[in-house]
Amino acid sequence: MHDKQGETMKFEYAILGQGAAAFAAAIRANELGIKTAMVGGSRTPGARLGGTCVNVGCVPSKELIMQGRFINELSLRESIISYKLKPGYFETSMSEKDALVEKMRADKYEKVLDSLENVTYVEGLASFKGDDTIATKNEEITAGKFLIATGARASIPKIKGIEGLRYLTNEEALSLNALPESLLVVGSGALGLEFAQMFLHFGSKVTLLQRSDRILSAWEPEIGAFLKGYLEEEGMDIRTGMEIKEVGEEDGQKYIRAVGNGKESVFRAGEILLATGRAPNSDMLDLGAVKVDTDNGFIKVSKTLQTTNGNIYAAGDVTGPPMLETLAAKEGYIATSNIFAGAKKEVNINEVPQAVFTSPEAASVGLTDRAANGLGIKCSCNFIRLSVVAKANIIKDTRGIVKIVIDHKTKRVLGVHILASNAADLIHEGTMAVKFGMTIDDIIDMVHVFPTMSESIKLAAQNFYGDVSKLSCCSI
């Protein structure tokens, strides 16, 4: 890692940010031999070198989710397993999470950065001073081309009482010193659901409040409906259609006053976790100085990731949803290739899979039924329950469904949506189908290993032609 202070530095390329998009861009620039500055600073305390994912996002949350899931699975096997949690198990889990984060930050970011001979790291938050200049508190940097990859942070809604309340976001929730006895979670997107179930599995009493009438409201309705039922079976209290009116604290308890179905309710718990979306880290960049347009703070980009200033590109969460670490990295790579290698690559969001790491997991790629219809496509849909999948019965987890959306005329796969154990791994067969225009006949024709969970996708394809519950395990 390199640090330069107190001087004006000249580069061909300056990357603003230090997360997934920034690192992918820096690695690509280094391959191309471009003299590059990566200018990184932490807008929030937890998002250090490496950005959100490794520090306060994917890595630490999934480590804790897996530990909580293991505890829950043991409790479901009490007929054959006797176990006892050690005192301080939550604190131990948090320590193990911290150790993993430190190792991955060192191995995957610090050491990688040190190996990039054409890249200089500059500590600090930068803003534009002109078309060819950015500045931090201590340095001024000039470059011919720029990439904005500053990411996003937790978005805090304007609610009565919020300014005086000590609440949790993903960052604070991942650094708690003790397990909260009870927790109120606001929001039912990926972050809200993952954290809610994680704390539930560790032993907290969890209530989840959602403004819309269903959880995972942008997903296929069957996914949200089934998942809601499974979470409630585990003991989570889920309230949909709730409008938050006020938050506060009294008598050592946090509270939320909300209205649902015309009735006001007050919910109380030891902690409140806000999972209400993400806000772009663009407000301190002085984008007006370089005529870069935004939409609610998110930077507008073309299909090739160019902003309204021809010398400035943007990638990752700062450009808006979907906010995925892998998508950010791909965009950082593509933007840099477009700038310096003469490429004119574009990102097809429709081919990008996403997942929610609940238990069971949810995963999706491509169009939903509603989205396809909105594009004027005459589509067909079919779904199967996991109870018809042999491997699901073997592992004694038949929760979930697989739904496939196809073009009615051509049978081409438009979308695949899964709720199942290991759905985040299974979705990649669906991603290949969507990306390469496969049909359900192509999926059926492909031999799958038996018994596996991936057979569920083949069975869902076969179900368009007949009831797969009436097939033998070896039917083709």
Image (spheres, rainbow, N blue to C red):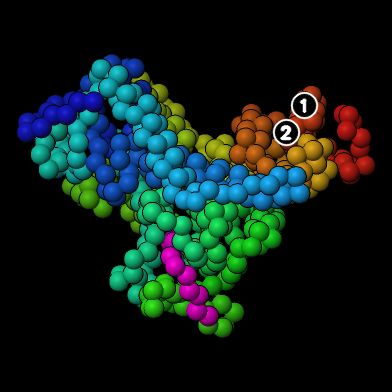
Specify the farthest residue to the bottom: 263
Between 102 and 324, the one lying in front of the other is 102
Q: Quadrant of residue 310?
A: top left
Q: Which residue is mark 2?
A: 454
Mark 2 vs 1: CB contact within 8 A: yes
Mark 1 residue element: loop
Question: Which residue is at a point 83% across and 43% down the rendered structure image?
Answer: 388
Q: Quadrant of residue 301?
A: top left
Q: Is residue 304 left or right of residue 385?
A: left
Q: Quadrant of the N terminus?
A: top left
Mark 2 residue element: loop
Task: Give the dominant element type of the magenta stretch: helix, strand or loop.
Answer: strand
Q: Specify whether residue 117 is painted magenta.
A: no
Count of numbered marks: 2
| Residue 411 visible in the displayed image | no
Q: Quadrant of residue 247?
A: bottom left
Question: Which residue is at a point 60% across and 44% down the rendered structure image?
Answer: 70
Mark 2 and mark 1: Cα distance apart in space: 7 Å
Q: Specify whether residue 266 is painted magenta.
A: yes
In the drawing, what numbered circle is on residue 20? none
Between 471 and 289, the one lying in front of the other is 471
Question: Which residue is at a point 26% across and 44% down the rendered structure image?
Answer: 42
Instruction: Give the amino acid at mark 1.
Output: His
Q: Is residue 237 left or right of residue 109?
A: right
Q: Which residue is mark 1?
A: 448
- What stretch of residues is rendered in magenta? 265-276
Using the image, determine if residue 268 lies above or below residue 379. Answer: below
From the top left corner, tell me how far across and down residue 206 is, in percent.
Answer: 54, 63
